[in-house]
Image: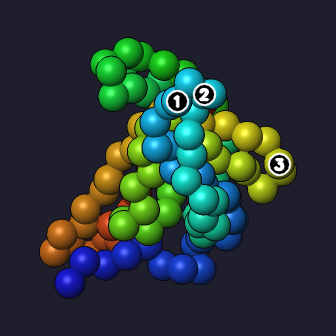
């Protein structure tokens, strides 16, 4: 059984609108979903799905089944809107560490 990150660590909530693609009117997003998470306001460099090195201004950690597509729109608790750059999954497997998904934001 995969151990998940404990719920008590997920102190924040963000609203995530999954990126569905683009149309002649601009980007298209799915309905917003509230996600419990732990926000990390740290600037770091990450590699985008296209292979570019970009700067992430913040990230959040959520349950391992949370996998928003790149370019999904995220509203942070303070009202700021940002977009998903990429995600990283940590799978604890049989080790006594929790599995989670880290979502890196612009």
Mark linked to residue 97? none
> On the image, which quarter does residue 24 sit in?
top right
Q: Considering the numbered disc 3 on the image, is that residue within a helix, a strand or a loop?
A: loop
> Does label 2 or label 3 sit earlier along the sequence?
2
Pointer 2 with pointer 1, Cβ within 8 A: yes
Numbered label tally: 3
Mark 2 Cα shell of 10 Å, populated few (<14), some (14-19), many (≥20) = few
Residue lying furthest left in this view? 94
Q: Residue at x 31, y 56 (%)?
A: 90
Q: Which residue is tagged 1? A: 23
Q: Nearer the viewer, mark 1 or mark 3?
A: 1
Task: Report the disc number at residue 26.
Answer: 2
* Residue at (16, 75) in percent of width and height: 94
What secondary structure is marked by label 1? strand
Above or below 7: residue 56: above
Q: Position of residue 84 (x, y in %)?
A: 52, 39
13 in relation to 74, above or below? below
Residue 52 at x, y percent in the picture: 38, 15
Q: Residues within 10 Å of mark 3 (few under 14, many from 20)?
A: few
Q: Is residue 61 left or right of residue 96?
A: right
Name which of mark 1 and mark 3 comes first in the sequence: 1
Callouts 2 and 3 close, C-beta under 8 Å: no
Spatial separation of the CA atoms under disc 2 and disc 3: 22 Å
> CA gap, disc 2 to disc 1?
5 Å
Q: Which residue is mark 3?
A: 79
């Amino acid at each position: 059984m995969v151990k998940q990150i404990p719920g008590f660590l997920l102190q924040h909530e963000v609203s995530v609108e999954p990126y569905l693609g683009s149309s002649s009117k601009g980007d298209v997003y799915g309905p917003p979903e509230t996600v419990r998470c732990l926000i990390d306001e740290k600037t770091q460099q990450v590699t985008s799905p296209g292979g570019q090195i970009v700067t992430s201004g913040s990230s959040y950690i959520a349950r391992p089944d949370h996998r928003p597509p790149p370019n999904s729109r995220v509203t942070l608790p303070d009202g700021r809107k940002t977009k998903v750059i990429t995600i990283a999954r940590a799978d604890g497997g049989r080790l006594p560490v929790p599995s989670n998904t880290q979502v890196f934001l612009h």
